[in-house]
Amino acid sequence: MSASALLSWGQHPPHPQIPHTCHWRDALPGTLTELARTHGSTLAFGNGRSYGDSCLATSDHVLSLRHLDRFIEADWTRGRLTAESGVTLEDILALAIPRGWFLSVTPGTQLITLGGAIANDVHGKNHHVRGTFGRHVRRFGLLRSQEGRLLCSPDENQQLFAATIGGLGLTGIIEWAEIQLLPIRSSQIHASVTRFEGLTEFFALSDELDRRYEYGVAWIDCAATGRTTGRGVYMAGDFAAEGGLQAARRTNLGVPVTPPISLINSLSLHAFNEVYWRKHPRSQQPRRLGYAPFFYPLDGVRNWNRIYGPKGFQQYQCLIPRDQAESAMHALLSAIASSGTGSFLAVLKRCGDLESPGLLSFPAQGTTLALDFPQSSRLDTELFPRLDTIVREAGGRLYPAKDAHMLGEDFRRAYPAWERLEALRDPALNSRFWTRVTT
């Protein structure tokens, strides 16, 4: 594989992408036309943080936008920021935090691009308060291979605005976007941390703490069994009223090389989870944290995806509707524990009822579970079919931005608006994910 070839963050499926870099917006129309003419289709590629194959072009030739990373305009009175789509959330925070602003919604990494955040309509720890990222997008510029440049907003080209938010990069090339930021008085987090014994206690804590705090999420011990199934640590928090406005510095800690085998196995998983669970308090304890460890714990280790070895990993993230959540989550976690595999960072989060403007947005009222698995043939033949059956029977769905295995019938059932997106898809753009689940 060429040293310049790109893969998704999970390194699976192993379809190297040949990047065609664009440094200036003026060059985008010609580059898009040439790629479509030469290779049949292409796809925008940001910072490569999508886990599965939604960021992989069917042609294996992608339009790399990471160098479109300029800020265009900022209104620090109202907290409105306009930037090119290759700007990362980290870039935005470095500029916004010292001026008293934060992202209205942020996922678990700040290393994705602005365009990627829109294309995947990312969500975070405050979905129950502010919904998805797309709810805070005011407008964006969209380049389509046939119509050229379009301005999209809730009032202009509304169909394309809705289809592009969560549209997996298939409706056109997002050139720039204007977003609304969130005012803060400090970059410190006033947090409450407590461990819980099982799923029933998790849902009780969530009922209590979601009403009191803007942010909430739980780490789950995916190896726990029996009466301890679903035990974990709940973290809730708000931005502190005082404490300074400093953007975090990037860490030098990282995984320098890819080991020959995955470092995640049943022994390391059980040992880590037991120690991590026991070190947290039984009752709610206040803590003061920087925003980076609270929102972005894995960003503290560069290239952490290498710990899964040369085969990479798959993430399984599902959403279960509210009325089925506890029973289905118990079944899912029991199946995962019995498989003897899983990840150190398994995340459980309840979502609220705020609707996204996007056609294919993943979050809805219910509970999400997300965890990583070292890649092996058994995932697709044994474990994932078991988990998919549980999700299907509960009326749930999987997250396209994290997926590398979803059955087409499951996708089409869970996302009935897919045909509307297909009707608006730019013919010059296609992904391996879209081909897999729609044909």
Image (cartoon, rainbow, N blue to C red):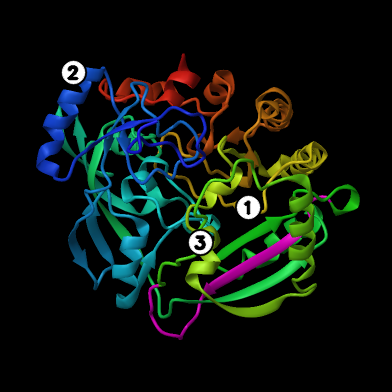
Q: CA distance from mark 1 to mark 2?
A: 45 Å
Q: Please indicate whether residue 127 sits to the left or right of residue 5 in the image.
A: right
User: Is residue 233 positioned above or below 67 on the image?
Assistant: below
- Which labelled disc corresponds to residue 296? 3
Which comes before the other along the chain, label 3 or label 1?
Answer: 3
Residue at x 63%, y 53% (from the top left corner): 349
User: Is residue 149 positioned above or below 438 on the image?
Assistant: below
Q: Please indicate whether residue 162 sits to the left or right of residue 437 in the image.
A: left
Sort mark 3 into few (<14), some (14-19) or many (20+) by Cα contacts within 10 Å. Answer: some
Give the amino acid at mark 3: Tyr
Give the amino acid at mark 2: Arg
| Residue denoted by label 2 | 37
Which comes before the other along the chain, label 1 or label 2?
Answer: 2
Secondary structure of the residue carrying tag 3 is loop
Secondary structure of the residue carrying tag 2 is helix
Please provide the residue range marked out in magenta: 229-247
Which image quadrant for residue 384? top right
| Residue denoted by label 1 | 350
The answer to whether residue 81 shows anywhere in this view is: yes
Image x and y of residue 334, in percent:
81, 41
